[in-house]
């Protein structure tokens, strides 16, 4: 994943995985997905949400990414 565009990354990853015939819920596919995300985002997903399925992972990642962006903007505004 590059930058903060998690939704774009999720859409691209899902499309590519489906074209390749991969099951989004397989352990191997989810492992590749996790490895492409920033470490702190994965750590927060695991620590707070314990995701198992593709839907779990994408929802958790989106929630924590939104929190990160919100906090980043709040801190930026207090410079």
Image (cartoon, rainbow, N blue to C red):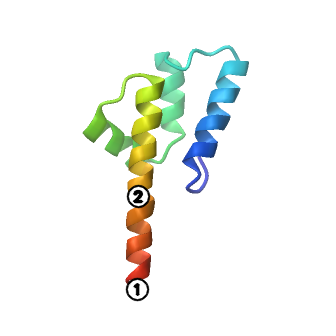
Where does label 1 land, which residue?
79
Q: Which residue sits at x=44%, y=77%?
A: 76
Mark 2 or mark 1: which comes first in sequence?
2
Image position of 44 with respect to 15: above or below: below
* Dot 2: element: helix
Does residue 56 appear to the left or right of 37 in the view shown?
Answer: left
**To which quarter of the image does residue 70 belong?**
bottom left
* Dot 1: element: loop
Pointer 2 local density, CA inside 10 Å: few below 14, some 14–19, many at least 20: some
Image position of 10 with respect to 51: above or below: below
For the C terminus, the quadrant is: bottom left
Proximity of marks 2 and 1: CB atoms separated by less than 8 Å: no
Q: Which residue sits at x=35%, y=29%?
A: 51
Q: Which residue sits at x=35%, y=40%?
A: 45
Image position of 13 with respect to 24: above or below: below
Q: Residue furthest bottom?
A: 79
**To which quarter of the image does residue 14 belong?**
top right
Where does label 2 land, which residue?
68
Pointer 1 local density, CA inside 10 Å: few below 14, some 14–19, many at least 20: few
On the image, the x and y values in percent for residue 28 come to 51, 19
On the image, the x and y values in percent for residue 52 come to 37, 23
On the image, the x and y values in percent for residue 11 come to 63, 36
């Amino acid at each position: 994943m590059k930058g903060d565009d998690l939704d774009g990354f999720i859409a691209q990853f899902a499309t590519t995985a489906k074209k390749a015939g991969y099951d989004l819920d397989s352990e191997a596919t989810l492992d590749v997905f996790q490895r492409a995300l920033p470490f702190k985002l994965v750590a927060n997903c695991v620590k707070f949400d314990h995701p198992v399925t593709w839907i779990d992972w994408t929802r958790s990642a989106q929630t924590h990414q939104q929190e990160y962006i919100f906090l980043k903007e709040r801190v930026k505004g207090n410079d």
